[in-house]
Image (cartoon, rainbow, N blue to C red):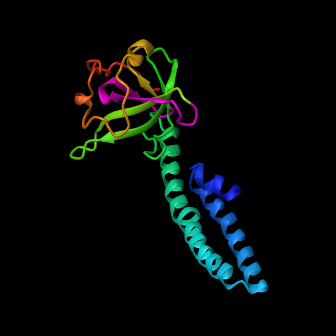
Amino acid sequence: MIAAMMTAANLGARVTGWGFVVFTLGSVAWSLVGFTSGQMNLLASNGFLTLVNLIGIWRWLGRQSAYEDGARAAEAASRRSATPTLFTATGFGGMKVVDQSGTDLGRAVEALLECASGRVSYVVVATGGLAGIDEQLRAVPHERIEFGCHALRVLMTGAEFGRMPILEPGQWPPSADQAQGCPQAVDNSSHKAL
């Protein structure tokens, strides 16, 4: 159960990897029980699970954690520079979102990028709810967002944000300009970064 919580929580490569270590200890223990009690089906199924868990350890504690370490190192180096310029794309989900006055609105759950340019088209912001239950999702066009290293600022009041249409599951717009009811884009070039 502990391993299942560690992997399901999606708290980063290291936590997930250690979840697979716990899974491996369990599958090895059950393999020993199967071997010593003559339960070959128990031995076979847990022997296979041990192999799967070892792949999980390699994937999450080896390869993925190396990727995350490299990204965090670049992000940290950027933060030490005169002007911070980088944050990890994988760290985008869960990033705090505030309105133009700095009041918390919710968190970013996804960013949709344009294929040709790689530019962010819009950011999906989740508000309300508990653990994803009863949360509301809204698409905020790139032009209405000020990107910062620690938070995203929506360039509108909380009331304006609240009037934006709520996204229905599976009905997200194909582009920011096709999100019905989205407020007009504004020039954010004069705003300071967070």
Q: Residue at x 52, y 17 (%)?
A: 103
Q: Taking 171 as reference, is 128 left or right? A: right
Q: How many numbered discs, if any? A: 0
Q: Which residue is drawn at 71% across and 79% down?
A: 31
The answer to whether 26 is drawn above or below residue 175 in the figure is below
Q: Taking 143 as reference, is 108 left or right? A: right
Residue toward you, 168 or 153: 168
The quadrant where residue 172 appears: top left
- Residue 3 placed where, x, y %? 67, 58
Residue, far right:
36
Residue toward you, 133 or 94: 133
- Residue 138 placed where, x, y %? 38, 28
In magenta stretch: residue 148: yes
The answer to whether 146 is drawn above or below residue 67 in the figure is above
Q: Which residue is drawn at 23% across and 43% down?
A: 117
Q: Where the N terminus falls, by quadrant?
A: bottom right
Range drawn in magenta: 130-150
Q: Which residue is drawn at 67% across and 70% down?
A: 24
In magenta stretch: residue 117: no
The answer to whether 7 is drawn above or below residue 59 in the figure is above
The quadrant where residue 159 appears: top left
Q: Taking 57 as reference, is 119 left or right? A: left
Residue toward you, 18 or 49: 49
- Residue 153 placed where, x, y %? 43, 24
